[in-house]
Structures are given as structure tokens and as C-alpha cells.
Image (cartoon, helix red, strand yellow):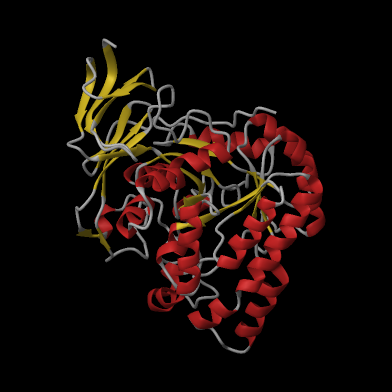
């Protein structure tokens, strides 16, 4: 080829032993090979650093539009993803106001997000009691998938889906070719155990952990799998936190159920001991688990029983983080750190990491052109430096309030540059250019 918009020189790809050049033209990867004979509008010397497909994080909460943008909006949230090597995200439906449970809400969110996102983005639709007639129109509008909660959400305008709502919702979504994802925790167990603890004045972190036992997750996963089996709806279990939960998914998939699961970075690198040490900044649901579950999740991620890693980036203001473990707002703000944590832990090969960080989520959500390092794919790339240790400090973080359970942690890898459709959006610690994220919608082959 003779010319391109961007040429990356001397990068190492997962599974490769020799350095290659990567040429991007018109937003797509045009050529990959050694010493490409081309001229370029922009040239980046990779210096033998690792190049990976731009990350695909399908589980974030950026709260746009509405008052919860005080915790995080798309401007700061997408900046944090760009700084972490993520080029495509899919944003959850519940913490916007209005929640994304109708076409009108979808349009309001799209209008608010499109001018300010630094990464390409898709939108989740929600399944809640009373909105079943909105599911087909939302699919036609372009939602990537549908999300339902099997336990209370803490958000007034996004109620948990009772079993009948979930059954009927799955029945409607199945012929659309999209999947339904569930937050799988048994509502009765978690709600009643929490109420008993609070009534008895037991409000420690340990009490909170005990109020969301592993059986609450596994029972809900089993119930969701049965509903998916009956309705024929593709199912995805978000933030699985236990080895037994993974086993239930794998057993169902082996008998032909279309079901997958994901794991969060925090369930991979933090344990219940960290929850007790860190307090509310590490509060999440499902909660952090014992080290034995952490090890089981790593093993399952490596062999593919867990499909991919997400951040479940769910920030809060410092005020919302105050109070006891039951009253403080939960969720972990970690979207910027996922890739650097995975590389630091060094428990996956680079090929496995590329699958877990990018390609598997792109395939599962039918995001054509995303998550791949191949000719014809979108020019979404991340350059990372290995053996570059530092202690993570708050000033590095791009999220609005810079609250993270990973502060003070030694990271040995660093995102050097993030490239979206051939344009550099982050490099050497700085955001580059204006927001240029675009809406992505699923490309289905039914």
C-alpha cells in the first residue's frame, strides 16, 4: 500500500514473536506486516511495545442524563476508559434519569451522550415491570442488549424484575436475536438478611458480606438459566463472583443453553479481606468473595468458561460513600484500571488477555469490526508498556471523583496510547483531541 492515515511501527502482537507495522486508513486496519512500505499522516513508533485490540467494556454506569452525573457522566467516564485502553463501551440503563426503559429515554440519552463521549458506545435497554411493550421498539432503535435485576436496585425508576416479568421479557426478546443479561442475586435472601442485620444493629463490613451469601447468587443463576432454557432467549450473567456460579453457567452451556458470564476486575484482584480493609470504596454487589473464589474465577477466565472481563464502573460522590456498609452507595469505579490490572497480575497469556479484554465481548454483543486485530476491523488499538512499575495515584485517574480501591497499588504495566478508528485519543498520560465517540449497534445475522 502507498499511504494511510496512521502507521504504527514496530509493535508486538499477541502470540507473535516478531515486530510488525499496522497501517490504518479510513478508520479501518488496512495492513499488518513487517516493514510496511507506506507513508502516513501520523506515525507512532511503538518501540517494540505490545499492541492489543482496543478494549470492549460492555458494563459501565455513566449516569447520563440526569442528576446522577454528579457521580459520573459520559465526559469523565469515557475519558477514564480511553486512558485505560478501552475504545468501545456499552452503558447500563438504570442510573440515567430517565432510565433507559423506553424509546423516549433512549433518545434522550443518545442526545446527551453523542457530543461528549471519547469512545464508541452502545446502550443497554432495561426490562422492568410494566415496560414489556417497549422492548421491540428499543431493539429497533438499536439497544445492544437488555438488562434485568433479580434483586432490588436501589434506583426508584428501575425496579427489579419479578419472575413473571423476566419470563415474559425473555419470551419477547428471544425472537429479536438480542440477549438478556441479569444481575443474579436472590431478592428475598439479600433483602431479608440485610434487614435483619440492620435491625439488630449489625452494620460492619462483615455483616454486609454475610447478607449477600454465595447461595443468593447461585440460586438466581440457576433460575435464570431455567427461564432461558424454556424461552430460548440468549442469556448473560453479569459480574459472576463465585466458582459455583461459573460451574452452573458452564454446565448449562454444555447441554446447549445459549448462556455466558463475565467477571469484573475487582472480583479477580480483590477479596473479602480487602473489603474489610478498604471499607465503602470496595462495596459492591455481589460482594467481594474469599480468595478461593478469586482463584476459581481466574482459572475459568483462562479456559474460557468466563467469557470476558468488565469493569462494572459504578462511581459515587464522596458523600454517597459515607455511612455504614449498608447505607453507603455501592459500586467500584475502576474502568481506567482493568487492562493494567490484568497485565500486572500476569495470569493470562496475551492471546487470552486480548480475548478477555476485547474480542469475546465484541462477538457476544454482535459489535461488528470491534475487538479484533485484523485487516478490515476498526482501527481500535491500545499500546501498552510492560515492566513499567509505579504506584497508582489519584492524579492519574480521569473519573470524576477519583475514588478507587486500587489507589496505592503497584501496577507494572501502563497504557501508552489508545487509538479509536485510526485517531489517537490518549497518549502518554494526556487525552488527545475532541470527543469523537459514535453510537454502535448490534449487527445480527438471524
Which quarter of the rendered picture does the N terminus lie within?
top left
Residue found at the far bottom of this picture: 200
Residue 295: x and y in percent read 45, 67
Residue shown at 50%/69% (left/top)?
293
Query: Depth check: 272 or 117 in front?
Result: 272
Residue shown at 51%/38% (left/top)?
362
Q: In the image, is 86 to the left or to the right of 393? A: right
Which quarter of the rendered picture does the C terminus lie within?
top right
Q: In the image, is 28 to the left or to the right of 237? A: left
User: Does any portion of residue 261 appear in the rendered image?
Assistant: yes
Residue 48 found in image quarter: top left
Residue 287: x and y in percent read 53, 69
Q: In the image, is 398 to the left or to the right of 305? A: left
Residue 90: x and y in percent read 52, 42
Residue shown at 60%/42% (left/top)?
124
Query: Depth check: 110 or 425 in front?
Result: 425
Residue shown at 67%/64% (left/top)?
151
Query: Depth check: 42 or 403 in front?
Result: 42
Q: In the image, is 4 to the left or to the right of 443? A: left
Residue found at the far front of this picture: 17
Amino acid at each position: 500500500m502507498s499511504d494511510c492515515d496512521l502507521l504504527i511501527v514496530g509493535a508486538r502482537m499477541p502470540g507473535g514473536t516478531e515486530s510488525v507495522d499496522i497501517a490504518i486508513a479510513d478508520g479501518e486496519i488496512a495492513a499488518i506486516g513487517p516493514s510496511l512500505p507506506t507513508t502516513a499522516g501520523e506515525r507512532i513508533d511503538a518501540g517494540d511495545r505490545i499492541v492489543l485490540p482496543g478494549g470492549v467494556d460492555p458494563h459501565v454506569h455513566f449516569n447520563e442524563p440526569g442528576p446522577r452525573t454528579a457521580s459520573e457522566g459520559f465526559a469523565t467516564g469515557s475519558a477514564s476508559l480511553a486512558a485505560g485502553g478501552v475504545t468501545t463501551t456499552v452503558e447500563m440503563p438504570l442510573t440515567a434519569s430517565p432510565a433507559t426503559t423506553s424509546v423516549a429515554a433512549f433518545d434522550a440519552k443518545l442526545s446527551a451522550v453523542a457530543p461528549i463521549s471519547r469512545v464508541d458506545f452502545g446502550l443497554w435497554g432495561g426490562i422492568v415491570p410494566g415496560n414489556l411493550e417497549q422492548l421491540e421498539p428499543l431493539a429497533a432503535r438499536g439497544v445492544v442488549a437488555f438488562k434485568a435485576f433479580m434483586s432490588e436496585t436501589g434506583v426508584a425508576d428501575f425496579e427489579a424484575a419479578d419472575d413473571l416479568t423476566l419470563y415474559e421479557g425473555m419470551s419477547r426478546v428471544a425472537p429479536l436475536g438480542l440477549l438478556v443479561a441479569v444481575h443474579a442475586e436472590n431478592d428475598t435472601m439479600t433483602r431479608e438478611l440485610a434487614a435483619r442485620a440492620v435491625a439488630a444493629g449489625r452494620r460492619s463490613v462483615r455483616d454486609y458480606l454475610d447478607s449477600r451469601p454465595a447461595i443468593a447468587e447461585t440460586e438466581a443463576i440457576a433460575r435464570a438459566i431455567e427461564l432461558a432454557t424454556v424461552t430460548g432467549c440468549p442469556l448473560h450473567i453479569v459480574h459472576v463472583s463465585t466458582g459455583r456460579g461459573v460451574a452452573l453457567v458452564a454446565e448449562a452451556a454444555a447441554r446447549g443453553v445459549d448462556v455466558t458470564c463475565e467477571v469484573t476486575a475487582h472480583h479477580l484482584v480483590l477479596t473479602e479481606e480487602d473489603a474489610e480493609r478498604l471499607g465503602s470504596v470496595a462495596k459492591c454487589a455481589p460482594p467481594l468473595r474469599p480468595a478461593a473464589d478469586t482463584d476459581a474465577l481466574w482459572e475459568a477466565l483462562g479456559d474460557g468458561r468466563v467469557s470476558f472481563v468488565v469493569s462494572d464502573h459504578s462511581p459515587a460522590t464522596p458523600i454517597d460513600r459515607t455511612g455504614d456498609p449498608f447505607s453507603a452507595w455501592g459500586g467500584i469505579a475502576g474502568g481506567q484500571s482493568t487492562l493494567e490490572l490484568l497485565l500486572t497480575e500476569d495470569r493470562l497469556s496475551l492471546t487470552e488477555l486480548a480475548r478477555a479484554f476485547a474480542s469475546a465481548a465484541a462477538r457476544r454483543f454482535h459489535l461488528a469490526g470491534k475487538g479484533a486485530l485484523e485487516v478490515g476491523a476498526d482501527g481500535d488499538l491500545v499500546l501498552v508498556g510492560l515492566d513499567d512499575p509505579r504506584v497508582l495515584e489519584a492524579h492519574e485517574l480521569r473519573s470524576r471523583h477519583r475514588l478507587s480501591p486500587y489507589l496505592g497499588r503497584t501496577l507494572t504495566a501502563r497504557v501508552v496510547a489508545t487509538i479509536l478508528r485510526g485517531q489517537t485519543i490518549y497518549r502518554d498520560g494526556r487525552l488527545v483531541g475532541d470527543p469523537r465517540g459514535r453510537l454502535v449497534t448490534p449487527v445480527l445475522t438471524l
